[in-house]
Image (spheres, grey):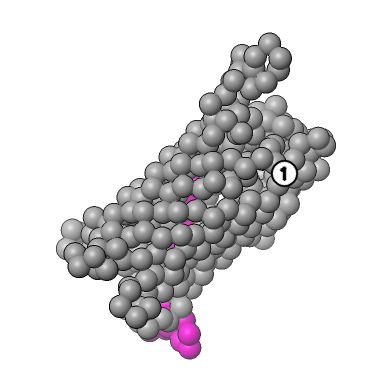
Amino acid sequence: MLKKVLPSLLAICAGMAALPAQASDFLWSDTYLNYRYLWQDKQPGTDKDVHENAVNLSHADAWTYGSNFFSLDVEQFTRQDATNVAGNFDMNGASKSTGSGEFYGLFRSTFSGDKIFATKAFSFGPIADIGLEIGADWCTQNDTFASNKKMIVIGPQFEIAMPKGFWNISIHAAHEWNTDAYYSNGSSDNFDLVPEFETAWLFPFNAGPVPLKFTGYANLIAPKGKGSGDPTSPGHTTEILAHPKLMVDVGAVAGGAPGKIDAGVGYEYWLHKFGSYTTPGVPMPVQRAVFFEVGYHFN
């Protein structure tokens, strides 16, 4: 059913993307550069704690007919997540790796039903709007698992009515291509078209004089099958990622410009990273990692 509907939805999105946009059409934008540090990261293939240093650049904006978001992550992992490079072991078989690196890019564009059709038909009860969201993910990492993820998504996004901040829930059809060097010898896996669920939120509030933001995202990807790379694989399983964080507006607390400098802590839960299954003799642990983040807004 999803394979029959997907071409029609893509055609609709192509038509929406052709809508004219002038610079004055953009209502607001926010570009955020941040650094985060995790010391309990887990990677497929190792049950050890991996330290992660990451720099992220994200951008969000709203325009006359919808909104856009992109996020670019550059991540460095310590030697517990060894690189997938020939000659990376000493004479005793111990890893000489100083760690792996990863790039993860993501974008989402949402076309608002109410704004495009100049109506309130897409607003009712707790729903502030319903839009059509399209997007893509791309990731590459040089560790032993050797992820090379490419994913496209399309589906409705529900904007929940909030007194402050925002809360969005998306239901997507998702198609992914990826690798798993433990099973498929690095060949590309073309997975099944499956449901994917995403949510993102930002709730600003004050604790006495301290301005805070509870923000983050979460997603769930349904089991995506065996893929085409390795017919002996047992198939992939449900993947769940949650990334909530509590941030302090440091600039406002220090008496400077509000909404510029954020700092805080978060928690990242990742079950079956990349949908990875349990390979005999290869640990596929669950990630439960506390992290620290500091960032600057260029809005």
Give the SS element for disc 1: loop
- Residue 139 image offset from top left, x and y in percent: 51, 40
> What residue appears at the point 29 percent right and 63 percent down from the top-left corner?
250
| Range of residues picked out in magenta | 120-137
* Image quadrant assignment for residue 117: bottom left
- Residue 158 image offset from top left, x and y in percent: 48, 73
- Name the residue that disc number 1 marks: 284
- Pick out the residue farthest to the top: 91
Left or right of residue 74: residue 47: right
Nearer to the camera, 248 or 240? 248
> What residue appears at the point 61 percent right and 14 percent down from the top-left corner?
87
Magenta stretch: dominant SS? Answer: strand
Nearer to the camera, 158 or 119? 158
Nearer to the camera, 214 or 167? 214
- Residue 110 image offset from top left, x and y in percent: 41, 63
- Pick out the residue farthest to the bottom: 125
Residue 122 part of the magenta-drawn span: yes
- Residue 119 image offset from top left, x and y in percent: 35, 82
Left or right of residue 268: residue 58: left
> What residue appears at the point 60 percent right and 25 percent down from the top-left corner?
84
Placement of 55 over or under 80, stated as above or below:
below
